[in-house]
Structures are given as structure tokens and as C-alpha cells.
């Protein structure tokens, strides 16, 4: 599976998507987790990607420079910075989805019925993966809610 996604046509598609977005694969991956209407706290992005908050800051800097994302104040806690897509970012991600949503030409070796079966099988795998991710996210959120320390992405003045 890794070879299918990281070499050949899958690799070319990723780079076409990055070219359409005008960003690197790392920036694109984070942008694909953002929404225009529901910004995420930078701390949440660090948790989702299992990276240090300083790395998220660097990636968000790049997304802002590309005009794809913007930092916004949290609606209830001014210490927390959130990140959401800009209008341009939404447009860019729509183009990216168009590129990444295309099945590689190599899939043409499969009959239409086989392609449909593969789609259905992968949909089942994705459904289980999403459920496991949601369960992990819930347990991590429950743990984080008991933490009374100052958020890593809180902005303090003083």
C-alpha cells in the first residue's frame, strides 16, 4: 500500500496537488485538516499530528504566507489562537481535491465491477479507521480536559 501511494502515479498526483496549492506536502497535509467555518486551536493541531507546538507554528506561518490559512482569536478564550482556512484556502483545497480525487490510471487494469468492489472495500476500511480515530480523539480530549495547565498555544501578554 505504501508503494502505491508514495511512488509512481500516486506520488505524481500528490505533487500536482501541491503545485495547484502552491505549497509543500507538509503544508498541504495540515491545510487539509482545516476548515473555513470551524477553526482549530493550534494546540489541537499539534495533538492531532503528534508534533510540538513550535512545529505547528512554523507550518501555520507557511500557510498564512501562502494565503491559505489565517490565525483567529478563540471566541471564548483570547489566550488561544485558532487556525482556519481563508476563502482562497477553501478554493485551493477544492482544486486539490479534484486532483487527489482522481483514481490513478493504473486502476484501469481493473474492470468496472472490480473498481466498484475495491471502492466499497476501501470505504469499509476507511469507516473503521475513522471510528478508531474518533474514539482515540475522544479519550485524548477527556484526558486533556482534566489538565489544568495553561494551553501550549495560549498567548499571554504582560
Image: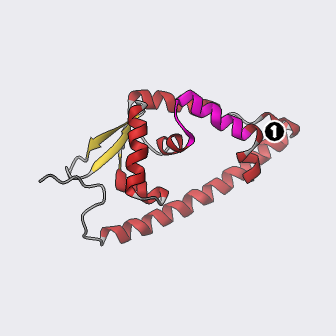
Name the residue rendered at 46%, 58% in the picture: 51
Q: Principal SS element in the magenta part?
A: helix
Magenta residue span = 10-25
Is 125 magenta? The answer is: no
Secondary structure type for disc 1: helix
Q: Residue furthest left?
A: 158
Q: Residue at x 45, y 31 (%)?
A: 90
Q: Is residue 15 magenta?
A: yes
Rendered residue at 38%/32% (across/down) = 86
Q: Is residue 24 left or right of residue 85?
A: right
Identify the image quadrant of residue 62.
top left
153 vs 45, left or right, is left
Disc 1 crowd, CA 10 A, few/some/many (<14, 14-19, 20+): few
* Residue that numbered label 1 is attached to: 107
Going by the image, does 17 lie left or right of 52? Answer: right
Whole-percent x, y for residue 41 in the image: 34, 51
Q: Position of residue 25 (x, y in %)?
A: 57, 41
Decide: is 78 above or below 101: below
Residue 24 location, quadrant = top right
Q: Position of residue 65 (x, y in %)?
A: 39, 33
Amino acid at each position: 500500500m505504501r508503494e502505491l501511494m508514495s511512488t509512481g502515479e500516486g506520488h505524481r498526483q500528490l505533487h500536482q496537488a501541491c503545485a495547484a496549492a502552491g505549497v509543500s506536502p507538509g503544508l498541504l497535509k495540515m491545510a487539509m485538516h482545516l476548515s473555513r467555518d470551524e477553526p482549530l486551536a493550534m494546540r489541537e493541531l499539534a495533538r492531532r499530528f503528534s508534533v510540538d507546538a513550535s512545529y505547528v507554528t512554523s507550518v501555520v506561518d507557511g500557510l498564512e504566507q501562502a494565503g491559505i490559512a489565517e490565525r483567529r482569536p478563540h471566541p471564548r478564550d483570547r489566550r488561544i489562537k485558532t487556525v482556519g482556512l481563508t476563502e482562497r484556502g477553501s478554493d485551493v483545497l477544492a482544486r486539490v481535491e479534484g486532483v487527489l480525487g482522481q483514481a490513478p490510471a493504473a486502476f484501469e487494469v481493473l474492470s468496472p465491477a472490480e473498481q466498484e468492489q475495491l471502492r466499497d472495500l476501501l470505504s469499509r476500511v476507511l469507516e473503521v479507521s475513522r471510528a478508531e480515530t474518533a474514539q482515540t480523539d475522544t479519550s485524548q480530549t477527556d484526558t486533556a480536559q482534566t489538565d489544568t495547565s495553561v494551553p501550549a498555544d495560549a498567548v499571554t501578554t504582560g
